[in-house]
Amino acid sequence: MLILGDISSMWVTGHLAFAYLLIIPFYLYKKKEMEPILILNIFIFANLIDAIHIGPLRLISHNLIGTSIFVAFWLLLFYKINVIKIGYVPILIIAVASHVVGDLLFSGYSLLYPFENQSYVIYGWNTPEHMIVGSLLVFAFLGLFLMNRDYSRLREFLHGEEQNFLHEFKFNKLFSSNFVTYYVFFAFRLFIIVQLGLFIFSNITGLSNWIWYTWACLASFVLCAITFSMLTFKPKKLNL
């Protein structure tokens, strides 16, 4: 195992794809459908500890103690304002655990901080292994997400919340459970687009040299960004 002081991050698309692929087999086996609000929170909690991914601040949430405290705080807060149900907690903990595994593989995680100031990683960030595995995870996620009707049900849910927000705007509703999730998802979608730009900037050399796994990773990023953008896109009807 390679040990280094790395402050990079596995891409947001890889984290959300890995979490979804770990959780969805249970629902497929049980022939159950995930509630749209749970799907959204899986995406959110799969990337939650990267919320303070700003230079050295990353260390605060990327260790076992910091992760536990940070996630427990948000679980409690989301439960108190009725964003999540108590039954969601084990599923969301799996989503968080998938983030830790992803970081240990590809971007670094300081397991024992503050007792030990070392970041552990196996393959490293933006390596060929990182891009290949990340691409495969995203392609598999998109295939299941679209075919399993999770995409269409989540799209219907988000359209409903958008209409509620636009046509029944009230200040006291700004902090209601569904609206809070809608705001967070909007920011999350923007984060995917920002990271797409960062990926292109970080891999200009690989893209210009037509390295296949770099282009595969870019394709997975673009498809994921389009899919998440389409979740809230509703074409207007033409009056002919």
Image: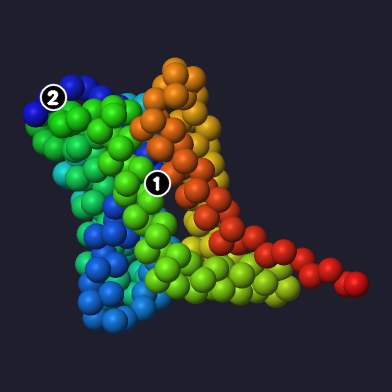
Answer with the quarter of the image where residue 27 lies: bottom left
Residue visible at 31% across and 81% down in the picture: 32
Which residue type carries mark 2? Ile
Q: Is residue 60 left or right of residue 231?
A: left
Q: In 3D space, how far apart are the residues under numbered discs 1 and 2 (Cα atoms)?
A: 24 Å
- Would residue 192 be found to the left or right of residue 141 on screen? right
The reply to whether the C-beta atoms of the residues labelled 1 and 2 are less than 8 Å apart is: no
Asked if residue 22 can be seen in this view, the reply is yes
The disc at residue 13 is 1
Secondary element at tag 1: helix
> Residue at the location (29% across, 81% down)?
31
What coloring was used for the rendering? rainbow
Q: Residues within 10 Å of mark 1 (few under 14, many from 20)?
A: many
Q: SS class of the residue under badge 2? A: strand
Rendered location of residue 117, percent (x, y): 15, 26
Question: Viewed as shown, does residue 203 lie left or right of 120?
Answer: right
Viewer-nearest residue: 28 or 211: 211
Q: Which image quarter holds the N terminus?
A: top left
Residue highlighted by disc 2 = 3
> What is the x, y in percent for residue 98?
23, 51
Q: Against 190, is 182 above or below?
A: below
Q: Please tell me whether residue 63 is drawn above or below residue 97 in the rendered image.
A: above
Where in the figure is residue 91, as x and y percent of width and height?
26, 66
Name the quarter where the C terminus is drawn. Answer: bottom right
| First in residue order: circle 1 vs circle 2 | 2
Foreground residue among 148 and 114: 148
Question: Which residue is pictured at 25% across the width and 25% down the height?
Answer: 6
**How far from the left and from the top, in percent, is residue 126?**
33, 28
Tell me the amino acid under the disc marked 1: Thr
